[in-house]
Image (cartoon, rainbow, N blue to C red):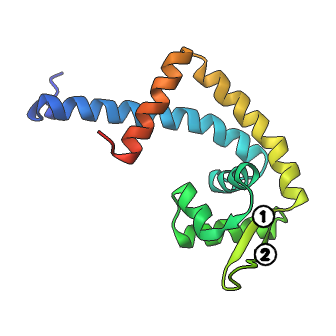
């Protein structure tokens, strides 16, 4: 069977970039899928877990700041925050300095949930990343940061 390889019509640079992009996406999906299984077992979406983890490690913040940290749109963050509030995991508190804004903070139920789920996610990630040496993990971290920020 003869296959028409359209990749040959791209430049060497384009093929190299496409190859790296495909591998990066496949690795992200593979690791992310195993994390999603854990989150689903605990009734959380990836966005809900991300919001709770951020609030747990960074403390209360306004919804826009939370959305910026998670790279989520305002509309998406409203849905995430509404669902977390409905589940009793977060509270909206009026900002003391600017009454137009609300600070989002974890409730005791939210703290208990993230303290239950986060160690399982961290163990999964530690296991998945164990195929890389310490130096490779550091290099990957730096490369991803540069790529994400568009720094040459």
For residue 132, say whether it is visible.
no
Q: Earlier in the sequence, mark 2 or mark 1?
A: 2
Q: Which residue carries the number 1 mark?
A: 105
Closer to us: 42 or 108? 108
Q: Is residue 147 above or below residue 94?
A: above
Closer to us: 115 or 46? 115
**Residue 10 occupies which quadrant of the picture?**
top left
Q: Which residue carries the number 2 mark?
A: 93
The reply to whether discs 2 and 1 touch (Cβ–Cβ < 8 Å) is yes
Going 64% across and 30% down the picture, which residue do you hit?
125
Going 65% across and 38% down the picture, which residue do you hit?
35
Q: Is residue 99 above or below residue 113?
A: below
In the picture provided, is 146 more to the left or to the right than 101? left
Closer to us: 101 or 48? 101
Q: Position of residue 29 (x, y in %)?
A: 51, 37
Going 71% across and 36% down the picture, which residue do you hit?
121
Q: How far apart are the two marked residues, 2 and 1, measured between alpha carbons?
A: 8 Å
């Amino acid at each position: 069977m003869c296959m028409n390889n359209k990749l040959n019509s791209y430049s060497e640079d384009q093929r190299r970039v496409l190859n790296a992009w495909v591998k990066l996406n496949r690795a992200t999906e593979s690791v992310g899928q195993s994390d999603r299984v854990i989150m689903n077992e605990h009734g959380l979406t990836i966005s809900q877990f991300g919001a709770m983890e951020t609030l747990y490690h960074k403390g209360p913040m306004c919804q826009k700041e939370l959305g910026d940290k998670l790279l989520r749109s305002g509309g998406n963050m409203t849905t995430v925050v509404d669902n977390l509030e409905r589940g009793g995991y977060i509270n909206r508190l009026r900002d003391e300095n600017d009454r137009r804004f609300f600070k989002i903070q974890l409730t005791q139920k939210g703290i208990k949930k993230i303290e239950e789920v986060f160690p399982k996610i961290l163990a999964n990630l530690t296991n998945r990343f164990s195929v890389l040496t310490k130096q490779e993990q550091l290099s990957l971290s730096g490369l991803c940061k540069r790529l994400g920020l568009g720094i040459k």
